[in-house]
Amino acid sequence: MSRKKILLVDDSPTAIQWQRMILENDPYDILIASNGEEGVRVARAAQPDLVLLDVMMPVMDGLAVLRELRSDVRFSRTPVLMVTTRSEMPSVLEAYQGGCNEYITKPVDRRELLTKVRGYLVDPETPHEHAA
Amino acid sequence: MSTLPERPRNAQLRVLRSELLEAHRELGQLPARPGSDSLKALVAFRRLLESETGESALRCVEEILINLVGSENFVVLLAGRDNEMHVVGGTGDSVAHTRLTAPTLEVLHRSVARVVPLFVADTVVGALAIYELLPHRDPLNQNDDPVLMLLSRYAATIMMAAEHRHILGRAPMAEVA
């Protein structure tokens, strides 16, 4: 069974390392992009099974990346989880209206991230384990 | 970071080197078990020790506060050559306010969520003043202690060591023995 691919898009190396550390004990291949443009490029090349997407990034922000991905039929059903410091309702609504599946606030909680990612990537034939 | 001395004395270099060694030792002892309270501290530690310049170490401290603690309104102060505290970094409206008003410890009397002293060995050389947490964050609690204690214990050492990397990296041990 091939491993699921998760694409992390964030301009903060600290955020990337934290999310990577949370996910590394599960059987995922982690892909990384440090800005929105690179995120779109890596997504098109690697076809991830799930995308964790920062909102506030220079050059191309997360909402623009989300629009790019959703406009591509290959990613119309790819789970996209926005990860952000912004918790105001207008920001949340804008993300959901743009087509994201989940909205996770920073600092990212380990259990929350694992539970949500596993929920989207669970193989129906594999026993589902709770986040430790 | 313009507040640092251009060339630390040998005694200061010895302290920095000794503290750096201690930091690496402590990093090696941090547990990497899933669920450990120290997991965030492990990430913070690794990121800090990757810094190659004082400026990048300072940016790293800012990233840690935003992404691992959950604050976008804080200042980083370090003692300058004049032994006064100077704002060297931070984000949010507190930064502009602090730079416009008297940049001394009096500004820390504003309402703060937490003030974290920054040490090199047993000397306070600066402070992190966290003014506000992100609105969705719970108040700071013991789960935040590993990261904040790490910053308190080693952030200033790592910033200063990175700033003087060209000296610490080149000088043979005999010169600073």
Image (cartoon, rainbow, N blue to C red):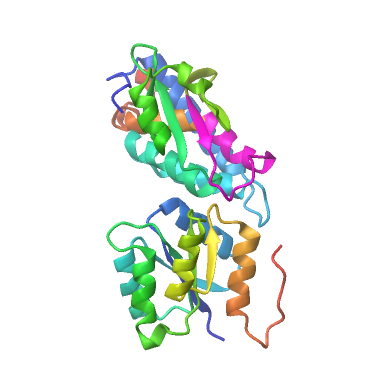
The residue lying at 43 percent from left, 20 percent from top is B14
Quadrant (top left/top right/bottom left/bottom right) for the N terminus of chain A: bottom right
The residue lying at 57 percent from left, 40 percent from top is B147
Q: Does the segment drawn in magenta span residue B1?
A: no
Figure label count: 0
Counting from the top left corner in percent of width and height, residue A83 is at 49, 61
B139 or B76: nearer the viewer: B139
Hey, which quadrant is residue A104 in on the image? bottom right
Counting from the top left corner in percent of width and height, residue A80 is at 48, 73
Quadrant (top left/top right/bottom left/bottom right) for the C terminus of chain A: bottom right
Q: Does the segment drawn in magenta span residue B131?
A: yes
Hey, which quadrant is residue A76 in on the image? bottom left
B58, above or below A38, in the image: above
Counting from the top left corner in percent of width and height, residue B94 is at 42, 32
A96 or B56: nearer the viewer: A96
Left or right relative to A122: residue A67: left
Q: From this viewpoint, which residue is outermost toward the front? A: A90
A35, above or below B3, in the image: below
Hey, which quadrant is residue A59 in on the image? bottom left
A47 or A89: nearer the viewer: A89
State which region is magenta: B127-153
> Looking at the image, can residue B161 be seen?
no
Q: From this viewpoint, which residue is outermost toward the top? A: B82
> Looking at the image, can residue B39 be seen?
yes
Counting from the top left corner in percent of width and height, residue B55 is at 33, 36
Left or right relative to B26: residue B167: left
The residue lying at 41 percent from left, 44 percent from top is B50
